[in-house]
Image (cartoon, rainbow, N blue to C red):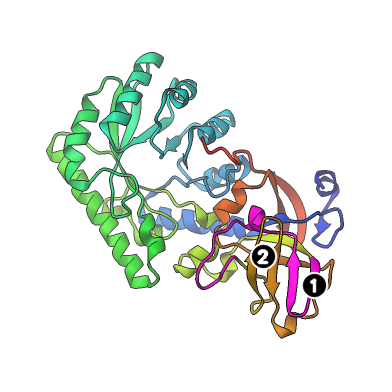
Amino acid sequence: MTGAAAAGPVDLADPLLDTPSLIVDLEVLEANIRAMQEHADRVGMALRPHIKTHKSVRIARMQLAAGARGISVSKVGEAEVFRAAGIGDIYLVYPVVGEAKLRRLAPLVADGGITLATDSVEVAEGYSRLATQVGARLPVLLEVDSGMHRVGCPPDEVVAIGTAIARLPGLELQGISTHAGHTHDVIAEPEIAAIAREEVRVMADARAALERAGLPIAVVSAGSTITTPYLAAGDGITEARPGTYVLNDYRTLELFACTPAQLGASMLATVVSRGPGRAVIDAGNKTLTPTRTEQHGYGRLRNRPRSTFTRLSEEHGVLGLAPEDEDLRIGDRVEVLPIHVCAWMDLQREVFGMRGGQIVEVITIDAMRRSR
């Protein structure tokens, strides 16, 4: 398929395009990147998008070219990939624990450009030892819990923990960070707005407390795809880290963060079996993942909104067909729209870029399965 794409545009029905294949609409991708950057510029925040959604050097460079100040990554493995590609301004948002990971991190931080996250003195002590080993001063952000209760220090402990981190050799406490991921636990727009307001309040209070303690705070990093539209520099947020917005999925759609026209990815699949009221496609939970929502199940078919998944097994997706979709035959192709596109992308070595209804590009997912 790579050769076919290089030779010229390829139709979705071309037999050389095997299935299941993840299709990225390049026009939607470009528009989504542009819209989020324009929002950040308009409200005075820097944009540091999280690449955990796409894990692609090609797409990260598109975001940087549009105006992003840098990128965010989750794991050392992702940092290795994007640093090797020449991207120098990286925030590693996950606490790095253990000698194996710190050894891998050493060559990445030696010449600067990578900011580290911690919510504890214990993790920061590992960073301090690393700073001594590589002979560099390492920038650190203190992660604060703004309500998700996953990682992040309690707001009433920021001064004690921040002060201890600032005293460790080789570390520079540059600011604070948070992730209000608990927006996925609500369903109403006023509830999302309330979470965003609380995110702002917690970070403003944390910054004020640290600065009263003599610790200047230059960076206040927050904002997901869901909450970034509610944030601004006037709230004290200096940078936002949305990720899913580049492609979107039904989770962001349900939470008012995109429109149906901003869904930029689909899984092309082939009908491999038929029965009365039932069709089976060649995409199961190893492709579509087990992620589901109450409203949309495991995914929805483009242009066939009343047919739904009744079951997923490893390699089979079983569809309950609406009467109007009984025309599906073995060999026909359908497009599945994602519930959780980040998980989809992490399962792909490559995806296919579509423009004007034709495949025009193969995009490598450079950091796929980099979970350590």
- Quarter location, residue 140: top left
Q: Report the amino acid beneath label 1.
A: Arg
- On screen, 285 above or below 75? below
Please state which of residues 314 and 89 is positioned toward the viewer in this rendering: 314
Q: Residue at x 48, y 53 (%)?
A: 37
Residue on which the image places disc 2: 336
| Picture coordinates of residue 206, whole percent (x, y) | 21, 46
Residue furthest bottom as drawn: 323
What residue is shown with label 1?
274
**Residue 278 belongs to the span the image colors magenta:** yes
Labels in figure, total:
2
* SS assignment at label 2: strand
Say if the magenta span includes residue 72.
no
Q: Position of residue 81 (x, y in %)?
A: 57, 33
- At x 34% / y 29%, what residue is drawn? 139
Of badges 2 and 1, the one in the foreground is 1
Q: Dot 1: few (<14), some (14–19), or many (≥20) neighbours within 10 Å?
A: some
Q: What stretch is highlighted in magenta?
A: 272-298
- Residue 87 visible from this viewpoint: no
Does 306 appear above or below 94?
Answer: below
Q: Can residue 313 be seen in this view?
A: yes
Q: Where is residue 150 drawn, in percent x and y?
A: 34, 48
* Residue at disc 1, secondary structure: strand
Q: Residue furthest left?
A: 212
The amino acid pointed to by label 2 is Val
Q: Distance between the residues labelled 2 and 1?
A: 17 Å
**Residue 42 drawn above or below residue 318:** above
